[in-house]
Image (cartoon, helix red, strand yellow):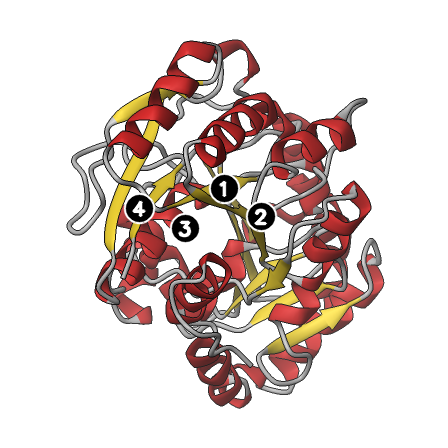
Amino acid sequence: MARITLLGPFWPYRGGIAHFGAGLARSLAARGHDVRTVTFQRQYPDRLFPGATQFEPGPAPPGVPRAPAELDTLNVGTWTRAADRIADEGGEVAVIPYWTPLLAPMWGVVTRRLRRRGVTVLALVHNAIPHERRPGDLLLGRFALGGADGLLALSDRVAADVQRLGVTAPVHTVPHPVYDGFGAAPPRVEARQELGLPARAPVFLFFGFVRPYKGLHVLLDAWGGVVQRVPGARLVVAGEFYADENALRAQAAPFGASVRFDAGYIPDSRVGLYFSAASAVVQPYVTATQSGVAQIAFHYGRPVITSDVGGLAEAVPDGEAGLVVPPDDPAALAAALVRFVEEGLGGTFEAGVRRVRDAASWGRVAEAVEHLAGTTPPRLE
């Protein structure tokens, strides 16, 4: 087995990348590896961060890695010192997450420093090319990922984007695993009671950071067609807004109490509450690579209604664990939501959700790390 160091955001940093790192750390440790973690002194400069805070409220949940804060994205000295310490302490494999060009200079320097010190470096690629493009994104992505010995992509779309960057290291695609670190959820009736939702109404959940590419405006365009056919339906929008909240609230105003905004970051301790209350999760993305929200939904046994962009359709088998519709098509989305209710598809999709949940395991990601690092024989399909 190997001494493996995972770099990136860990508690108290919040968000899907931090959750992913914690899940991978647990899985690798369970397989017998000596797992170390390194996190940020400063992740994003405050002026570049669109939300209220980068940190989780409250104490650390049980089982979350406690990582030393060594990396400052604006201080090159911390990059080289962290890499040297990993090598000096006998690190054999290092894994960096890549999701934004803002961190590309740091990752490019860290990976090359580690490789010069004899450490095998793998890049776990959440997004190779950002949803909201800026000049220089491809060049930065190539610099960040070009120093790695191997790359893990979380969908075929991400793997294709890596190829667009011109990175020549081996790329292995592995399904995004189910997020299982949010704890148990109460029964649906209790969750709805706590959230003040009707006990028997169809409840659709839009969850997570609200950004333009995630298509909440498309869902609100579709909602009129839904409540016309299903008057008791409810839509819950739960998450922090990185888009024009006032414009989206104005768009929802004609639908009255059928649309509810729980604006603000949902702490880990309440995530299960929202998914338990939902009949289904809706992801009306206009563009995407993959999404951890679908994996939270599957963990809690909830089907997903999503648009056919990026790797979302890979994660949500149409007609088995949810429904897939064309992107940016409010009429098609409304028809899918109505069909879900009128045909009672929630129960129908239960077996499919379980199958997807069982297949998308953390063990497969850990095996991919081992395979690319050469620590075990390849055992993946």
Q: What amino acid does circle 4 point to?
A: Asp
Mark 3 crowd level (few <14, some 14–19, many ≥20, 10 Å Cα): many
Q: What amino acid does circle 1 point to?
A: Pro
Q: Compute the Cα span from label 2 to label 3.
A: 10 Å
The reply to whether callout 1 and callout 3 are in contact (CB within 8 Å) is yes
Q: Compute the Cα span from label 4 to label 2.
A: 21 Å
Q: Is residue 290 left or right of residue 333?
A: left
Element at label 4: helix
- Residue annotated with mark 3: 20
Q: Quadrant of residue 50?
A: top right
Residue 342 in view (yes/no): yes
Residue 196 in view (yes/no): no
Q: Which mark is residue 126?
A: 2
4 or 3: mark nearer the eye:
3
Residue 334: % across, % down: 75, 65
The reply to whether callout 4 and callout 3 are in contact (CB within 8 Å) is no
Q: Which mark is residue 97?
A: 1
